[in-house]
Structures are given as structure tokens and as C-alpha cells.
Amino acid sequence: MDAVRVALLRDVLAGTEWLGATRGFAAVLRGSVVSHGGGLLLVGTAAYEPWHLAAHLVDEAAWSGTPELVPTLVRHGARPSDPAHLAVGLGRITAARRGETLLVAAPEGDAPLLERVADARRTGVTVLALGPGGGELADLAHETLAVPDGSELDLDTVQHLVSAAAGEQTAPVPRGPRRLRDRLSRLAESLTAPPRLPGEAGRPGAGCRRARWGHGRGGSGQSSSGVPAGASCHLGSFSHCRLRSRAVCMACSASAREA
């Protein structure tokens, strides 16, 4: 989901509890990692690894100038042969120490993970939970954002709102309808400008960063759009979440045509 879609979604959700809830949770997340100089661990379950959230937090860290938001993605099936950023296993939670933050994002918990989360909390790790709410995980967490089954938003959509809010420098100033339209117009103009070449600074290149995280892949081994796991935006092979525009990867696509 790009910046325009996040802004539009927030406009639709105005007057609901979701905006305050996601911004409040994001503020706790940001405050925890910034005050301790980083140390953000992100984990899901064996069936649901939060690739999307990891990728978007990396982007928000770059765009907001807050490197502390860059997470370490902890994986259940990590292998030594995996790329370094994907090779961190559950032992990293066991090794976590006071001052670090553990964000658990999953539709449900499992017993082995909960045991590690409990051990991490006892050592002084700040535990945040993004999921259905209730149960043992909610009891272990210092802060929880509940996304119950059957709610208006699903877990993936809430993750987009949380990551976007985590990158905000200050609380947004309320705007009238005319100011909102002006802002959306400026965002649309900036995002539809000619793409930069790969390696140049700017948001169009963010697709390359998402690709390294396997952006769009879920626990099923496929993106929600049906793209097989392992696909990426690099060299024109796209793997996006179902709410995301392909335009952000125009730079990679152009590179593929030239190759």
C-alpha cells in the first residue's frame, strides 16, 4: 500500500477507533525502539511470518530518518544458507536482553513461540503484540493492538497503518476537506513522476528494498495475489500485497527491459 492509499484509507476510517488505535500502538513502538537506540525484533508464527510489516518498517525507517525502526525479522524456518537478513532464527529471541523490543505480529500464537516470548519478557524485553487480542500472548504483552476475526480491517491492512504511523515524526495536524484534497494531489503528483533509476534516492526505489524481504509472501508460500514465494520486484518479477500498486517498481521494470 503506497502513501496515497494510506491517506485515502485514513480518510475512510476517520471517526472510527482504528486511527487512534493504530497511531497509539505505533507511538509505543516508536518510543520503545528510539529510547533504547534500536533493538527491534519482529516475529510471527511458522504459518504466518510478517514479511509485509518488516518491509514497510524498513521503508518508514529510511523515509523518516529513524533507523531504530529497522527490524530484525526472526523466522521459524531460518537456515544458515539464507541471506543474512533472513537467516535469524528463534534463538535470537532467547538471546534478547533488557532494552530490546519484541513485536509479535500473527493471527494466532503457538505454544513454542509463547514460551520464548515469556522468557524474553522475564529478561526485561518490551513485548508488543499485534493480532487477535486476548489469550496468553495478550497477557504477556506490555501493549496490544487487537485485530479480532471478523473486524472491519484485516491484520495485513492494520500492519500498513501501524508502519505508516510509526514513521510519522509528529502527530498529524487535523485538516479540512480542502487541505486533504490538496495533500492527496501533491502525493499523487510525486508518486506518478518519472521513476528514478535503481540506486538513486527516493521512494520509487523502495520496491527494491521490499524485494529483499520477499515482500508479499505469507506463510502459505505465496503472495496474497498468488505470486509464488521467491518472486520479487527485482528485474520485473513482481510480488506485491493485494493492496499495493505496481508503479513503485517501475524503476526495476525499466532496468529489466534494458538488460
Image (spheres, rainbow, N blue to C red):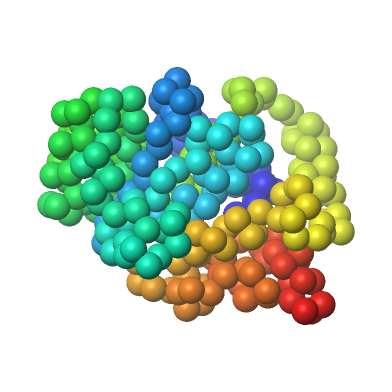
Where the N terminus falls, by quadrant?
bottom right
Q: Position of residue 166 (x, y in %)?
A: 53, 34
Q: Residue placed at 63% from the left, 40% from the top?
A: 62
In the rendered image, residue 99, in percent from the top left (x then y), is placed at 33, 25
**171 lies above or below 233:** above
| Image vertical order of residue 115 relative to residue 143, above or below | below
Decide which of 83, 228 is in the foreground and name it. Answer: 83
Q: Decide: is 98 above or below 238.
A: above
Nearer to me, 64 or 199: 199
Looking at the image, which residue is at 74% across and 28% down? 176
Q: Can residue 10 be seen in this view?
A: no
The x, y position of residue 120, in whole percent, is 21, 35
Nearest to the observer: residue 232 or residue 52: 232
Q: Is residue 39 left or right of residue 164?
A: left
Residue at 75 percent across and 60 percent down: it is 198
Q: In this view, does 225 lie to the left or right of 176?
A: left
Q: Quadrant of residue 81?
A: bottom left
Q: In which quarter of the image is the C terminus?
A: bottom right
Q: In this view, does 43 lie above or below 164?
A: below
Asked whether residue 85 appears in the rendered view, the answer is: yes
In this view, the residue in front, 246 or 135, is: 246
Farthest-out residue, front: 80
> In the visual, does 178 lie left or right of 85?
right
- Quadrant in the picture for residue 97: top left
Q: Residue furthest top?
A: 35
Residue 213 at x, y = what percent?
Answer: 50, 59
Q: Which residue is at 14% across, 52% downward? A: 112
